[in-house]
Amino acid sequence: MIRRRTLVALPFLVCPGLAGARAAEIVAADSITLADVTVPAGRARVVAIFPLGAATASALSFAADLPEGERDLLAVAAGGKVLALEVLAWRGKNGSRLLTRLSTVPDRQRLRLERMASAPHGHGYRHEEWTDYLAWQGEAPMADAPVRPVLAGTWQASLAAQRAGTRAMLVGGLHGVAPALLAACPPPCFSS
């Protein structure tokens, strides 16, 4: 049987980095610090904690909604730095959708992002499924590590181009997701 005090302590047990956080930081309207990284507070949560290379990494999810739809981003952090920023989920007002399932590869050097996307196309919907891989690069931002060349014109190629743009912004070793970084992340482009 779970006791009330266990439920109150559960966030601190799942994410030890929260144990030293002040209550005011946790309920802040604009941002929150999770795993030593500051992210927007909306829908913010720790998705996973896992070994990555020689470090312990955290996957953090948070809201980054746009006028075109609802978007959840995924920040991969280790050592207090953001190493990757990815679209985790998208629900466009036009009916487009993107879902991502995150897992680690047994070699502890890569993350696997399994994607499923759909968007209105003609009188129906166009669907694509693919897997992206991100490779550990030490303290540098994670690198794109596809197992085969990405096909031009696919939605995978569109997200890879967006990833390259955000990776360039992470090179300095950001300790949080700043508004400028969010502004540089356009909505997913699911054009035909």
Image: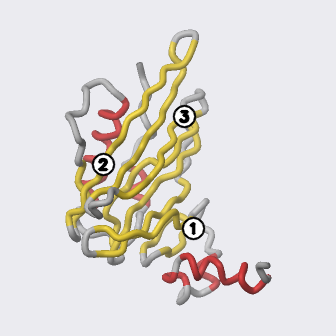
- The reply to whether dot 1 and dot 2 touch (C-beta < 8 Å) is no
Which residue is pictured at 48% across the width and 24% down the height?
Answer: 127
* Residue in the image at 49% along x and 20% along y: 126
Q: Which residue is mark 1?
A: 30
Residue neighbourhood size for the residue with mark 1, other residues' Cα within 10 Å, grouped as few (<14), some (14–19), many (≥20):
few
Look at the numbered discs 2 and 3 and tell me whether their residues touch, using CB distance below 8 Å.
no
Residue 149, image x and y in percent? 20, 34
- Closer to the chain start, of discs 1 and 2, is 1
Where residue 139 appears, as percent x and y from the top left, is 23, 70
Q: What is the spatial separation of the Cα atoms under label 1 and label 3, in whole angstroms?
A: 26 Å
Q: Which residue is mark 3?
A: 97
Q: Amino acid at mark 3?
A: Arg
Q: Amino acid at mark 2?
A: Tyr
Question: Which of these two is toward me, 117 or 175?
Answer: 117
Where residue 71 appears, as percent x and y from the top left, is: 53, 46
Which of the two discs, 1 and 2, sits closer to the camera? 2
* Residue at horizontal 31 percent and vertical 68 percent from the top: 52
